Image (cartoon, rainbow, N blue to C red):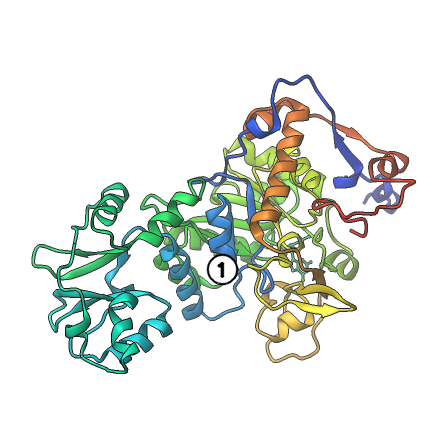
Amino acid sequence: SEPFSEKLRVPEALTFDDVLLRPMESRVEPDAADVSTRVSTNVELQIPILSAAMDTVTEAEMAIGMAREGGLGVLHRSMDTAEMEAQIAQVKRADELVIRRENVVTAAPEQTVNDVDAMMEHEGVSGAPVVDDEDRVLGIISGTDIRPYLEVGESDEVREAMTDEVVTASEDVSARDALELMYDHKIERVPIVDDEEHLVGLVTMQGILARRENENAARDADGRLRVGAAVGPFEDERAVAADEAGADVLFIDCAHAHNLNVLDSARAITETVDADVVLGNVGTRAAAEAAVDFADGLKVGIGPGSICTTRVVSGAGMPQITAVAEVADVASQHDVPVIADGGIRYSGDAIKAIAAGADAVMLGSYFAGTDEAPGRVITMNGKKYKQYRGMGSVGAMQSGGGERYLKEENDEEYVPEGVEAATPYTGTLASELHQLVGGMQSGMGYVGAESIPEFKERSEFIRVSSAGQTEGHPHDVMITDEAPNYSPNE
Ligand code: XMP
């Protein structure tokens, strides 16, 4: 056999700080650079960004925010299947033009106005169609109809207070027609009815305006927001449930997808669901070769994450730029998209990952401090933070996550591969994404590429020494005002 010392002839593997993009001739103004991309074989996004499937990063609110901005949120899997289905449904109906019947809050004619007032408050709506026992629309009641009754302290029946001349529309109404009806009649909601006046849905002014604001949103063929869901490699039932609930992309979520049992199970899952299936995480050419014939996307990252201790605990891992490039070598031959997951601190890291061959990037810590991430803001020494923890941390494993990191059933003696931390509170997701995407477009401008595919093709790396790296950060000055896209302690 080979002498052991041969093992020391080791290949070099590089990560974000080891490389920079070579500036090139360009006519591309950054804001003209098109960042639309593919996250999996059949799913396109307007921006190449995904939020991580972690319990301190992505639940429905984050997924709605990400999709409205053109990206994709991937729901974590540390929740039961029913909860996951509910969250998928929440994203899917968030910007729907026609709210479907089962989600429309309605009133009955014999209810009292007091009762309806309390119901509308509880449901968070400002008006409701009034329907009879057979679900036929009799009228519509809103806060404006109710107020005079409440002011004089009387609680009459809804049939007295409602507006009974209702403007309705049929199911094939367009957003433009609905809006016109609303302007003409000075109303804010139009019940959608079938031929026999049965209620089948509702269109609201608020819904139409929200859709207009987000022209760039990531939407499915029916115009609903896109959403991803993480499933365990052996969770066939959860995968089917997520697929049926309408998830656009399933992410088979595993710390080491080049495990042969994981691959077998993942292959079987792809055969039973309609949604695209992205497999991860992988980090080598060999792993990509083993999965590329059945996966609709490959997600790369063995230990680069900000809260990861995988490399220190297990001694295994792959620096992220090399990992992405190895996987992309294989995936690009089969036209399978690649997602770079973990370790991205700055917009520059994100665009370097694309140059290395990724089609999109996934981030955890970058979004964990936003309003849209789960959890509340905590204050320490006068500064605001939000919790952020690895899914392989003790805390996440105790609250049901962490199958990904080989948690033993009923075993309290975890061997964690992640830490629990706090991350600075950063405000809205939209402003974080604005900085992230703007920085990436700036990188495309320096390289002279108008689109992601062109940028992947054209960009070149140069190797940076540690002196070069120091030169690249602010130096020899004391920063007086924090920039929105740079923090010196990262
Ligand atoms: P960033 O750097 O964006 O990384 O915060 C997010 C990614 O890290 C992975 N992840 C983990 N990796 N132990 C690990 O080794 C963990 O406990 C852990 N939790 C998350 C995951 O790929 C995520 O998207």
Residue behind mark 1: 61
Q: Look at the numbered disc 1 and say if its residue's Cβ is closer than 8 Å to ligand 1.
A: no
Q: Is residue 296 left or right of residue 359?
A: left
Q: Nearer the viewer, residue 429 or 251?
A: 429
Quadrant occupied by the N terminus: top right
Report helix, strand or loop for mark 1. helix
Determine the image quadrant of residue 93: bottom left
Q: Position of residue 35 (x, y in %)?
A: 54, 34
Can you see residue 218? Answer: no
Furthest-front residue in view? 152
Q: For this view, does 364 lie left or right of residue 116? A: right
Mark 1 neighbour density, 10 Å: few (under 14) some (14–19) many (20 or more): some
**Who's the residue at 12% across and 65% down the image?**
136
Q: Return the x and y of residue 295 as percentages of the image width and height.
A: 49, 45
Q: Nearer the viewer, residue 3 or 305?
A: 305
Quadrant containing ligand 1: bottom right
Question: Can I make out residue 386 in this image?
Answer: yes
Which quadrant of the view contains residue 328?
Answer: top right
Horizontal relation, residue 404 to residue 272: left or right:
right
Residue in the foreground of this view, choosing between 169 and 490: 169
Q: Which image quadrant for residue 190?
A: bottom left
Q: Amino acid at mark 1?
A: Glu
Residue at screen point 43% across, 51% down: 270
- Residue found 87% across the figure and 39% down from its top: 470
